Amino acid sequence: MNRKSIALFASGNGSNAVNLIDFFHNHPQIEVKTLVCNKADAPVVSKAKIRGIEVLTFTNEEFESGLTVLQELDYRAIDWIILAGFLRKIPVNIIHGFQDRIINIHPSLLPKFGGKGMYGKYVHQAVIEAKESQSGISIHLVNEEFDQGKILAQFKTSVDPEDTCDTLSEKIHQLEHKHFPIIAEQTILNS
Ligand code: GRF
């Protein structure tokens, strides 16, 4: 059986992207084929290359139109897209080209703290300011509405009074690293 091919999309540090690359290394049914990035100097780029993963970078205009990106994904026979800290909006033509085959991770318990402007530390800041006692992660499919696709799984952690953005981010990253690869694997294999 042909392995399912994944394109990872990431913009920054890439701890989730690296964790997924390592998890699927030598996987019998799933292969990370390429990493798509919008910044040639993002730390994730060298981390992926060291692991032997091809990196594709596109300009902002190319991301907005989506056409070149789609062509490159088609050329590589990509089956699934996984967004792992990707900060640009996915254009509608890519969403339609990969209907129900784009997975995202969001660092809050959606629908809370989702939507435009809610990414990275802004999410954690908002959670702390709202004095939430719990936060967590949401792994979900991507549709045209920001952070509103079908939720595949959520995992919780406590928010303690002494938590800062940094400590909460650390707790969230631990949850992400533990659960994201497994949920992605189950979703792809059960599709
Ligand atoms: C993660 O917290 C993820 O939930 C969010 O962006 C962050 C990326 O972190 N979408 P990293 O670059 O994978 O370390």
Image (tube, helix red, strand yellow):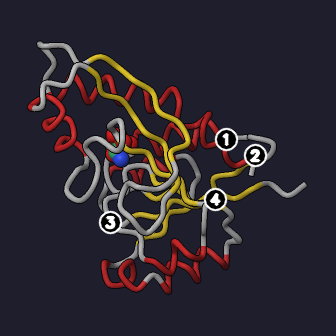
Query: Badge 2 is on which residue?
Result: 189
**Residue shown at 51% from the left, 37% from the top:** 19
Query: Badge 3 is on which residue?
Result: 88
**Residue shown at 19% from the left, 41% from the top:** 121
Mark 1 touching mark 4, by CB under 8 A? no
The image position of residue 84, as x and y in percent, is: 44, 49
Residue neighbourhood size for the residue with mark 2, other residues' Cα within 10 Å, grouped as few (<14), some (14–19), many (≥20): few
Mark 2 touching mark 1, by CB under 8 A? yes
Front residue of 28 and 93: 93
Mark 3 touching mark 1, by CB under 8 A? no
Answer above or below: position of 147 versus 92.
above
How far is the residue under mark 3 from the one under mark 1?
24 Å
**Residue flagged by tag 3: what amino acid is it?**
Arg
Quarter of the image where ligand 1 sits: top left
**Residue flagged by tag 2: what amino acid is it?**
Leu
Q: Earlier in the sequence, mark 3 or mark 2?
A: 3
Q: Earlier in the sequence, mark 1 or mark 4?
A: 4
Front residue of 139 and 131: 131
Answer above or below: position of 168 versus 153.
above
How far is the residue under mark 3 from the one under mark 2?
27 Å
The image position of residue 50, as x and y in percent, is: 50, 48
Pair 3/4: label in front: 3
How far is the residue under mark 1 from the one under mark 4?
15 Å
Q: Secondary structure at mark 4?
A: strand
Q: Secondary structure at mark 3?
A: loop
- Which label is found at residue 152? none
Q: Secondary structure at mark 2?
A: helix
**Residue shown at 55% from the left, 46% from the top:** 51
Q: Earlier in the sequence, mark 3 or mark 4?
A: 4
Q: Secondary structure at mark 1?
A: helix
Mark 3 touching mark 2, by CB under 8 A? no
Query: Badge 4 is on which residue?
Result: 33
